[in-house]
C-alpha cells in the first residue's frame, strides 16, 4: 500500500513545471465532473481527461463510486475525488522547492546535491521529503528515534572533517521513512551537546533545528564544514574520524598529516 510520503513525492514529480495540472488537481473535489473542471479551468475536455488520467495512475485521485460500486458520472464525464490520504494535505507540499540554485549542483546522475561551501544549507520540509526519497549520502544521515547520543556523536565526528559538513535527520528510518522524533528539540540538543563535549576534543559548534514534515517533527543535527584548521579527536579511543559516502572511517596517519596541513582528504 502506498504511504503518504510516497504520494507527496509522486505529486511533486508530476506537478513539476505543470501548474495547469496542479490546477486540475485542486479542482477535483468529489462532486465536479471532468467536464465541469474543464469549464472552470478554461481548458479543453481532452486535455483535462489526460491530466486526470495521469493523476489517477499516480494514485493521487480516484474515481468516485456510489454505494453499489458503480463509477459516478455527470453529463457523460467521470467524477473524481482525491485519494483519502492526501485530501487534507496543503498544496504547498506539492509546490516548487525553495530556490537553492546557488547552493546545489547536479551530479553525473542528475541528482541535486548541496555544493561544498563555507556553510551548510538547512533543508525545508519539502526538501527533506526529497532527501528521504533519495536516501543517505555524503551529506545526509538518517537516525531513527531512540538511537543513542553516542552513535549520533560518532556521526558528527565524521562529518566534522569533511568539506561539506553534514546533517543528521533524527526521526527518519534508514530506508527514508519519516517516523518523527520522540523528544523535543531542546531535549535532543541537551543530550547531543553533552555527549559532544564529553567525547569530541575540542568541542565543535553543533546546531539542532526542527522541521515539521507531514505533521511529524524531524530534528536536524547540523554539522558545519571543516574549517581547515581544527582536528577533532574522539577522546574515548583517541582516534580521528571522517565520513566517506554513508560510512564513518578512522583516519590513517598520512590522512591526519594532510589535515594538519589544512588539506581536505575527501
Image (tube, rainbow, N blue to C red):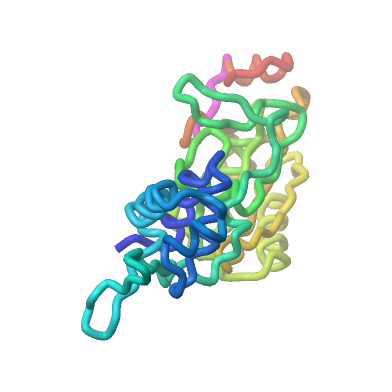
Residue at 54% from the left image edge and 71% from the top image edge: 88
Q: Residue 80 sits in which quadrant?
A: bottom left
In the image, is residue 203 above or below residue 179? above
Q: Where residue 209 sits in the image (x, y, percent)?
A: 71, 55
Question: In front here: 153 or 104?
Answer: 104
Q: Is residue 233 left or right of residue 169?
A: right
Closer to the camera, 56 or 98?
Answer: 56
Q: Position of residue 180 (x, y in %)?
A: 54, 65
Identify the residue at horizontal 57%, vertical 33% (top origin).
241
Based on the displayed image, in which of its 4 quarters is residue 1 positioned? Answer: bottom left
Q: Name the spot of residue 175 as percent of width and height, x first.
A: 40, 50
181 shown above or below 126: below
Residue 119 lies left or right of residue 158; in this view the side is right
- Image height of 147 relative to 229, above or below: below
Can you give x and y, in whole percent of width and height, for residue 185 in the image? 69, 64
Quadrant placement of the C terminus: top right
Left or right: residue 3 compared with residue 28: left
Q: Which residue occupies the extreme front position in the image? A: 75
Res 175 visible: no
Extreme bottom residue here?
A: 67
Q: Determine if residue 63 is in view.
A: yes
**On screen, residue 145 above or below 141:** below
What is the span of residues highlighted in magenta in the rendered image? 248-254
Please check the rendered image and state whether residue 250 is part of the magenta-colored stretch, yes or no.
yes
Is 119 in the magenta?
no
Give the quadrant of residue 239.
top right
Instruction: Give me the residue at 55% from left, 48% from top.
Output: 20
Q: How many marks?
A: 0
Relative to the observer, which residue lies in front, 240 or 8? 8
Amino acid at each position: 500500500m502506498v504511504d503518504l510520503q510516497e504520494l507527496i513525492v509522486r505529486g511533486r514529480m508530476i506537478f513539476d513545471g505543470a501548474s495547469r495540472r496542479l490546477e486540475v488537481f485542486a479542482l477535483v473535489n468529489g462532486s465536479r465532473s471532468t467536464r465541469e473542471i474543464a469549464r472552470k479551468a478554461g481548458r479543453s475536455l481532452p486535455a483535462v481527461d489526460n491530466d486526470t488520467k495521469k493523476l489517477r495512475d499516480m494514485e493521487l485521485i480516484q474515481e468516485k463510486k456510489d454505494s453499489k460500486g458503480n463509477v459516478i458520472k455527470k453529463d457523460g464525464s467521470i467524477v473524481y475525488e482525491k485519494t483519502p490520504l492526501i485530501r487534507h494535505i496543503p498544496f504547498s507540499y506539492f509546490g516548487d522547492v525553495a530556490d537553492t540554485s546557488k547552493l546545489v549542483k547536479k551530479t553525473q546522475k542528475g541528482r541535486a546535491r548541496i555544493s561544498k561551501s563555507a556553510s551548510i544549507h538547512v533543508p525545508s520540509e519539502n526538501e527533506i521529503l526529497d532527501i528521504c526519497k533519495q536516501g543517505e549520502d555524503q551529506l545526509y544521515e538518517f537516525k531513527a528515534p531512540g538511537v543513542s547520543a553516542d552513535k549520533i556523536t560518532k556521526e558528527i565526528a565524521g562529518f566534522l572533517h569533511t568539506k561539506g559538513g553534514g546533517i543528521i535527520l533524527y526521526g527518519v528510518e534508514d530506508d527514508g521513512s519519516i517516523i518523527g522524533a520522540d523528544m523535543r528539540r531542546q531535549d535532543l540538543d541537551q543530550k547531543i551537546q553533552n555527549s559532544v563535549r564529553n567525547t569530541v576534543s575540542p568541542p565543535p559548534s553543533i546546531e539542532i533545528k526542527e522541521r515539521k514534515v507531514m505533521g511529524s517533527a524531524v530534528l536536524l543535527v547540523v554539522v558545519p564544514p571543516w574549517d581547515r584548521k581544527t582536528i577533532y579527536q574522539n577522546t574515548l579511543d583517541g582516534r580521528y574520524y571522517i565520513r566517506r559516502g554513508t560510512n564513518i572511517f578512522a583516519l590513517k596517519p598520512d590522512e591526519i598529516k594532510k589535515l594538519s596541513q589544512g588539506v581536505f582528504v575527501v
